[in-house]
Image (cartoon, rainbow, N blue to C red):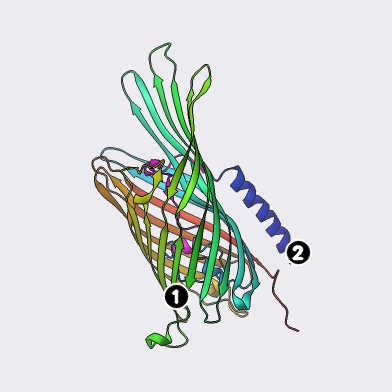
Amino acid sequence: MLHNKILRSVFIFSAITIFISGNYYGEGGSLYSRIGVGTPLISYSARNLAFGELGAAVYSEYNVGGYNPAGWAGIPITRTEAGINYNGLGLKDASTSTYYSGYHFSGFTVAFPIKYSKGITLSLGLLPYTKVDYEVVSSAADREETFSGQGSISKAYFGLSYKTPFDMAVGAVYEYYMGKIDFQSNTDFSAAGVNTAIYSNESSYFGGGYRIGIISPNMSELLGLNSKDLLLAGLVYSGPVNLTTDTALVAVSAYNTKTLSRNLIETELPYSLGFGLSYQKEKLMYTADLYFQPWSEYRSNGLTPVELKNLTKISLGMEYNYKPGQFLSFWEQIVLRAGLTYEQTQYRIDGTDLSAMGISAGAGIPLSSTNRLDIGFMFASRGKAEGKIIKENIYNLFFTLSFGDFWFVQEER
């Protein structure tokens, strides 16, 4: 037990240090992340990624990173969780192709079950929200122009879950958003004696928001199913967020750096709504989810990029789980997962709406009676290589490490 506490303390310190010092290591990313505040992230854990990223009607017995806060009501012991993910991106247009890759810190979360019998759980965490990372190079006879962007918005949160006397779980979260995104244009003139011109548009974001969720009581008997089966419905709503944004236009030359303008503006992030079902029969659980976010309502200083539209995502998933037991072998305790996704993305490029399809799989591996390593992999394809549209093949590999401990468990006397 002492060894587990020392390991967890090192784990917590390392996770926070990595998050504060910067959560991205890579060499490029999606060109579509230049639109708005970047590419939004829905899934933070390997478990959710493996069965399709969502899971609104899934309890988080061994995981904290599910996106429905009501799911925390199923956590029986204190859990500390963090992860890292590998992101590979293959880009292809009508004439060329390339591949980028990088590693991202996928979040740090802690959950304290204050009273498990009533589903009262307190959770805190730091999670990524969006990321920007791209570079475009254009060459002409007398110059080379480079357009790039890098940065992210993250959120710190705290929230509570509670299970009502009617066996309905509810959860509520306060989220504080913060981050910095830098867009740059760099013109390098080939003529001798002509200096390189660099302009940087820097934006710093901060503001608060909220997220609420519910998971229904077991509805299997209402539909004439076996009473031992578990049929649940879940709903998640994140309210719209107004971010105060400090913007600065900076010119960099060989002689000095000069701020040309500085303004405070408002950035409005749209609400999101998710609905899901889960059905568990013995060792198998099936999930079906719908997620919607109207990015057409995004505003930056009152303006909406013409490339943004509403996002709709559908996912199907399954999980095979023996349920941990005293006499199960190591192989019997491994949890297997798989999922499918279809997405009408928030991007409209050159009049064409971009869609994406993905397939995912993963496993939960026991490290001890309370500690687990979850692995999730997803391959997705977005867009098609024609005209001004770039086809993206996306490879996501998540590793999530979860430590459990009996901090608030009440002993029976």
Closer to the camera in the image, 218 or 24? 218
Q: Secondary structure at mark 2?
A: helix
- State the image quarter where residue 267 is shown: top left
The answer to whether any part of residue 369 appears in the image is no
Give the residue pinned by disc 2. Answer: 2
Q: Please give the range of residues in magenta.
A: 24-50
Kind of residue at badge 1: Met
The answer to whether any part of residue 159 appears in the image is yes
Q: Give the x, y percent position of residue 100.
A: 42, 42
Q: Secondary structure at mark 1?
A: strand
Q: Is residue 266 left or right of residue 303?
A: right
Quote the CA–CA distance across marks 1 and 2: 35 Å
35 magenta-colored: yes
Numbered tag placed on residue 285 in the rendering:
1
Kind of residue at badge 2: Leu
Write the residue at 73% across / 59% down.
6
Q: Is residue 115 left or right of residue 227?
A: right
Numbered tag placed on residue 45 in the rendering:
none
Q: Is residue 333 above or below residue 303?
A: below
Write the residue at 52% across / 77% down.
322
Q: Is residue 273 above or below residue 330?
A: above
